[in-house]
Image (spheres, rainbow, N blue to C red):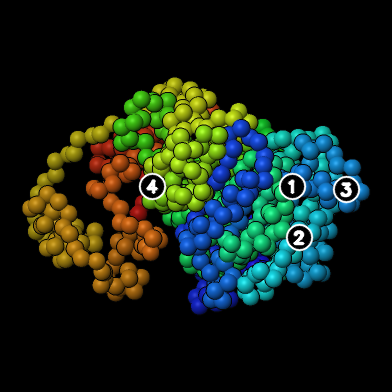
Amino acid sequence: MGNMSDQNQNQGHRGIPYAGQSWLIEERDACGVGFIANQNGAATHSIIEKALPALTCLEHRGGCSADQDSGDGAGLMTAIPWELLHSWFAEQGIVPPAQENCGVGMLFLSQDEGQATIARQVVEEMLLSRGLTLLGWRKVPVDASVLGPQARENQPQIEQVIVTSPNLTGDELDRQLFLARRSIGHALSDHADFTRQDFYSCSFSCRTIVYKGMVRSAVLGEFYLDLKNPAYKSAFAVYHRRFSTNTMPRWHLAQPMRLLGHNGEINTLLGNITWMRARQANLAHPNWTQADIDTFNPIVNSESSDSANLDNVMELLVHSGRSPLESLTILVPEAYKNQPDLALYPEIVDFYEYYSGIQEPWDGPALLVFSDGKQVGATLDRNGLRPARYCITKDGMVIVASEAGVVDIPEADIIEKGRLGPGQMIAVDLQTKEILKNWQLKQRIAKRHPYGEWLKQNRETLKPQPFAETATLDSQTLLATQTAFGYTAEDLDMVIVEMASSGKEPTFCMGDDIPLAVLSEKPQLLYNYFKQRFAQVTNPPIDPLREGMVMSLTVNIGLRGNLLQAVPENAKLLKIDSPILNDGELSFLKEQKSFPAKVLSTLYH
């Protein structure tokens, strides 16, 4: 088991041959995911009996270790199986409190009993400090004989901590469990004798629980004996089979995470992490005191996987009062600017425009399946480069998966089937017993606030300014100017002349034999020192010419508002259609009064 606290901290990978790069930042997923849900919200064991074979049908989308038996990871997220836990209460001689006042944490503890004991003590202390009452520790029954050699060698102790709070239920209880979990992570990180930090909380909720591990799909139900128990009942199941593309598999990196399961890569991860760190100081919400905010910060960690970081931010939004549907619509927006269908839904466009100035997209490719126990759903990011098939049956069962046919359903029982397109979402509301389609659910979300009015009243737009005529330079001045701006003979002969004569960019074969700027003996422009990071193995080429529907150059300038609250002031931004500005537009920016500007010298002194 890896050295991982609740904040997903890692001390570094000893095998990395170079310093300065956290190995987990390269963690990416190319996996099989899906969910099964009963529209009527009825909890049955048949959901689990369908989810486990569905997971097995996605085995080919996952990976195995060199021993050919230890899977990269597989897991299920379900509702807490209270009926199963009632037998544990009886065995312990405990009179169970009201179910709505209880929560369960699924924990990975160290193989070292001394370290595990410290972890249990800290857990109990932090629960007490949050006003939660410990009902007991339940050792999760497992069959380790089905594990592969590597998985067995790294197998953690797996225990459930069961708690209650007589005064809290629902969302309030879930928030308190969230804060307790974060407090536990901080306390273990600061504990002088807890050096290994072998602790991970798979889930800690009053509604959901996650059973996962470093196993193959077919092994999950054999390893966790609870999953084969007829008393294990749920109205839904989110399942995930992991393919670890860039690192060794680990127990805690299996999915689902606490709210979502992810197939794909978040290629904007470094930018997302940087922006989230920048906005942490401005986070505020009536649900949280400043002490609470200090407890759950930092939200993101550059040493966590892309999926874990997205899950952490989504979790914050959900505990701050947003639904999972709204949270992911904000974090993973569709390409709305050139979407013809959205002409019928101006309020959805206003919603996206409003949040474009507050939250940058977490861009994939990504298929995300998710649940908070009240809603379960799936969404594709705006690129739409991961498969997502769905079907709906006569009896109200909704099935979504990376592939069609993972659940054996007679064709006569299917009333609708299809696929999610780029940026689309489908969900089941287990409380209202509704199946929600893309435009329907987004329209509801967008109508919660008058985003269009807020934009009209607060946002300004930079009007395009004409390009001023410039005098022709003599040859000596032209050469000096070209040299100052880093032009090379190759740029002039192969790029600029070609563009001027043909009106389009020249096409070159792949490959770049230009020395790295940092190693070049010649002066370089600043942007030559930077290279784009992307997952080259799994991403097809995308460019603005061929993928115009998902491309935009729009930039918003101004103060980034508080992500946790939707208020009119957050719309006070200056919208610019392109980051490339002429002299007239720059002059306007310097002179306008709504957004005070400063001029910074780019000269090297």
Nearer to us in this view, 582 or 333: 333
Binning the other alpha carbons within 10 Å of mark 3 as few (below 14), some (14 to 19) or many (20 upward) gives: few
Identity, as a three-letter code, of the amino acid under mark 3: Ala
Residue ID for mark 4: 384
| Sequence-wise first label, 2 or 4 | 2
| Sequence-wise first label, 1 or 2 | 2
| Sequence-wise first label, 4 or 1 | 1
Give the image location of residue 299, x and y in percent: 61, 50
| Foreground: disc 1 or disc 3 | 1
The residue sitting at 40% across, 23% down in the picture is: 456
| Foreground: disc 4 or disc 3 | 3
Under circle 1, the secondary element is loop
| CA distance for labels 1 and 2 | 14 Å
Task: Report if the CB atoms under discs 4 and 3 are less than 8 Å apart.
Answer: no
Under circle 2, the secondary element is loop
**555 to 518, vertically: above or below:** above
Q: Which mark is residue 231?
A: 1
Binning the other alpha carbons within 10 Å of mark 4 as few (below 14), some (14 to 19) or many (20 upward) gives: many
Task: Report if the CB atoms under discs 1 and 3 are less than 8 Å apart.
Answer: no
Q: Which mark is residue 90?
A: 3
Does residue 213 appear left or right of residue 555 in this picture? right
| CA distance for labels 4 and 1 | 38 Å
Under circle 3, the secondary element is helix
Does residue 407 appear left or right of residue 550 in this picture? right
| CA distance for labels 4 and 3 | 49 Å
| CA distance for labels 3 and 2 | 16 Å
Identity, as a three-letter code, of the amino acid under mark 4: Gly
Identity, as a three-letter code, of the amino acid under mark 1: Ala
**498 to 87, vertically: above or below:** below
Give the image location of residue 595, x and y in percent: 42, 34
